[in-house]
Image (cartoon, helix red, strand yellow):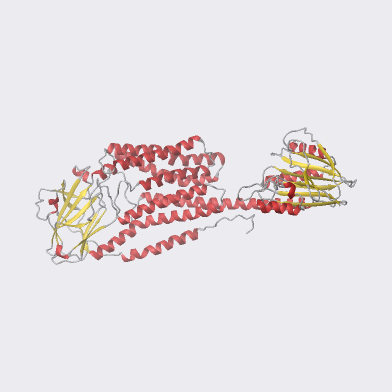
Amino acid sequence: MKPSEPFVPRFSFQTLLGLLLCLTAILYPALAKAQVAGVHHPSLDPHHIQVESLSHPVDLTSAWLIQEGDDPRFADPSLDDSHWRSIDTAHPLADYGLAHPGFLWYRVHVHIPPNSHDLAILLRGFSGSEQIFVNGVLTGPSRPFPPGGVVSTNFDLRATLPDTLVASGDLTIAIRADMLRLAAVTGNSVGLRPGSLLLLGDASTLADTTTLHVFRNYTSNLVNLSLTVILLLIAVALAIALRTEREYLALCIYLSASILITAIELYRSSREVDSTRWSHVPNAILGIIIVLAGIEFARRILHLPRVGWIVAYEWTIAGVLALSQCASTIAFGTTPLQTLVFLQTGIVILVYAPLLLGLPLFALWIWRRDRNFDALLLSIPLLIRGLFLYIEVFAFVLYLLHLRQATGFALVPLKNFEVGWDEVADALFSLALLLFLILRTVRLARARAELAAEIEAAKTVQQLLLARASQPTPGFQVESVYLPASEVGGDFFLVSPTSDGSLVAILGDVSGKGLLAAMRVSMILGVLRRESSRHPATILANLNEALLTQGATGFTTACCLHLTQSGHFTIANAGHISPYLTGKSASQELPASPALPLGLAAAQTYDLLKGEILPGQRLILMSDGVPEARAKSGELYGFDRLPTLTLLPAHDIADVAKRFGQEDDITVLTLALA
């Protein structure tokens, strides 16, 4: 690969589609395995449910007896529960006057065929901490309750029933639940609620049902996680290939933190990990990182300076999120007032919401003002994320006004999968961000290809000009070496014989690098070729006026000399490194009078230095790339070594500086009598 052709990774939609198809192929067997028989829905009277056959799982979700309090006798099958309240779980507990229940017991009496075997109970979507008792025996889970009842699992809990426990055919199923703090914090329905499921049936059949549920419930999460991983791989490749584009590094941090949060949540859900006082601290820290990295990514894409108000806003968001997590950690296991929880949530929304909707609108304004196409592309994923947040805020406000029964949303109406609207928003956000990266990468690749072509053309022109910079010089021995630090350089030199047999030589260095510096070098060489004077001071003065007339930016240092065949020389210097006069065993720096570089001020005059070289001596002109060569350790070559270095031929001088550590263009010109 040529240096002028920067590496830019190439990604296609076919590749991304293939990865998603591979993911589906891996997960699909779970769906095929989990095609279980239908569920039997008997007419339910919680005092007496008669089950004639267990060939299919029996749905016991809808009707239950409930009693507030926490008494171990509530699990006893002989307990008289005729006075307990009967409820229909299609309605939330709040409809029965239990908006914020604490400990609550559920009971139901089921009669199944005697001597049934290999039975299990499957419980799904129970919001709170629960324990299942059958005929007074704890069947699952056996772990202690977390303080405050903070577990809300969407995973299946299966309790296996020993054959001896169900041999009589008379079952009393009781559920002990603690839901106080969960109801205060979330504001949603708790316990057995709309969307919950409790099945009684064959253990293997219920295991297949769980497999099907896992596939339907977590496929969308895995797809979103896969999209985020793909985005991270693309961002890492771009960050490595385009090291100057620091926004990709910020995006890598953002995506990495997002992947870690998703992975932690999937692990906690699949393993049914209980909440503890510190269990959500990692997610809180990762959330702060996501916010700060996202702001930095957007700031660089929109070309915004890192001014004080941006820094202050970043610290404000980070501080509010950190204080919110501290409050949650301190209050864990207690019963905080619901008003305090809502106040904490409101403060977070008040600080965070303007960012998610204000930033995409600001991006659209920048696109309209500056025609920044990246701003337009970035506004699409930002709008998706911002609009969904505002929909959530609107639902939260409706809940506070008692116009909604819960703060959350129902699932997306899909037949075979359980997908939340937040997952749809995440997928749309990832796809929009993927589109942004692809289009921006294509645009950057085209721009860099065009720039590489321009630099290659400038390199060719510069090589032609410098090849003609040294003409035949009878009576003199001239050596020149030019080693640009990049494709094109900012050094120049010209050796021109005169009609009387003498010669004029000039060596200089323009400020800046790259294509602009190369263009200025070409312009300077054109001016010098039209120069008719042989006087070094006049040549520099005319070049200075030409640079000022053409409006060239920056400055140029140069050293010009006139050398006769008798060995007499005249030197004028405009802020350049002083030349050296060397013999066979010694070298000395010729003093130069202070003078401004070219292109800074008009009507400049330059003092002359006169001298004579003898046979065996040389005059050496060089650019600052020689003394400013820098080793990997950071050490500069420096001026102290130049007296010894200038004793070498021109090619050796340049080679020593390059091997020491070239950082700038290196040009060496030596002149001697033939």
Can you give x and y, in whole percent of width and height, for residue 294 in the image?
Answer: 46, 45
Residue at horizontal 16%, vertical 46%? Answer: 69
Q: Quadrant of the N terminus?
A: bottom right
Residue 647 percent across, percent down from the top left: 77, 50
Residue at the extreme right of the image, as rendered:
500
* Residue found at x 54% / y 38%: 305
The residue at 42%/37% (across/down) is: 316
User: Taking 569 as reference, is 486 left or right?
Assistant: left
Q: Say which residue appears at 79% left-offset and 52% top-offset.
A: 479
Numbered-mark total = 0
Q: Is residue 656 left or right of residue 208?
A: right
- The residue closer to the viewer here, 90 or 193, is 193
Does 200 sit above or below residue 86?
Answer: below
Picture coordinates of residue 590, whole percent (x, y): 78, 41
Is there any visible trace of residue 476 in the rendered image?
yes
Which of the two residues, 390 or 342, is positioned nearer the viewer here?
342
Does 596 sit above or below residue 284? Answer: above
The residue most toward the top is 603
